[in-house]
Amino acid sequence: MIPRLTRLLPLLALAAGGALFGAEAPATPPATAATDYVLQPSDLIRVLIFQEPDLLREVRITQEYTITLPLIGTIDLRGRTVRQTEEIIRSLYDRDYLVNPQVNLTVLEYTQRTVQVVGAVNSPGAVVFPPEQRMGLVEAIARAGGQSRIADLKRVRLTRTSAEGKTENFIINVDDLMKGASGEPWLLLKGDVVFVPERLL
């Protein structure tokens, strides 16, 4: 790893050369499904720092949503996307160790993420998330074969348990969501349970 101070002169020279030849800084790449993916426990990721091969690491995210990297130590990734994690790592290295580090994070293995969709649907049971993607409540019901003829989509219950063990229940009008109503899209998390009740006859 090149010390921070010794890198300043080459970087200044490079900047001057860029100014002479009209070079521009690379634009921030647009968001993609991969960079918007929210990292999960058991995901295997590769962290690469440009021109710093000794900092290359392949690490598996712990059940506490953490990873440990050289110099900067343990990082909490709870609720973070790939892009957000890249920025966190970049800022930590930039603060004390490197000058303008370029960080690339790649998910090598995705943990399987499932939710349970039960009740008045045509194929109740586990529904697997598409890799790299988020999944909403409406899509989960569709992947469970869709609602049955006697389903009450106005009173769908979503049960969610946090990593700390706290359980919450939400009653959601999925009928409105299917009709394009604005508001909370109700993106699902690994381990959620969706219960579609029957209509009262």
Image (cartoon, grey):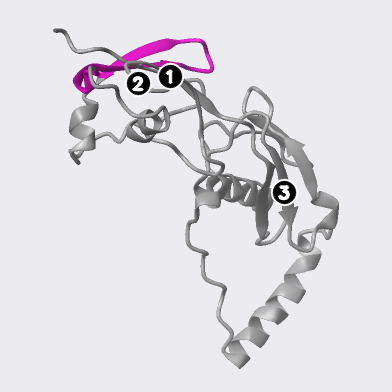
Query: Where in the figure is residue 20, as x and y percent of width and height?
Result: 61, 92
Q: Is residue 27 above or below residue 118?
A: below
In the orientation shown, which residue stands out farthest toward the top? Answer: 201
**Looking at the figure, which quarter contains the C terminus?**
top left
Can residue 164 be seen here?
A: yes
- Where disc 2 sits, the SS reads loop
**Apparent side of residue 106 relative to residue 81 in the rendered image (left or right):** right
Q: Which mark is residue 18?
A: none
Residue that carries the numbered disc 1 in the rendered image = 124
x, y percentage for residue 14? Answer: 70, 80
Q: Residues within 10 Å of mark 2 (few under 14, many from 20)?
A: many
Taking the spot 72% from the left edge, 40% from the top edge, the residue there is 72
User: CB of mark 2 within 8 Å of CB of mark 3?
Assistant: no
Residue ID for mark 2: 121
> Looking at the image, which is closer to me, 39 or 73?
39
Q: Amino acid at mark 1?
A: Pro
Q: What residue did someone put label 3 on?
A: 47
Q: Which residues are magenta?
A: 151-171
| For the residues bearing labels 3 and 1, Cβ distance under 8 angstroms | no
Q: Position of residue 15 (x, y in %)?
A: 65, 79
Q: Is residue 69 visible?
A: no
In the rendered image, the vertical position of residue 150 relative to residue 200, given as above or below: below
Cβ–Cβ below 8 Å for labels 2 and 1? Answer: yes
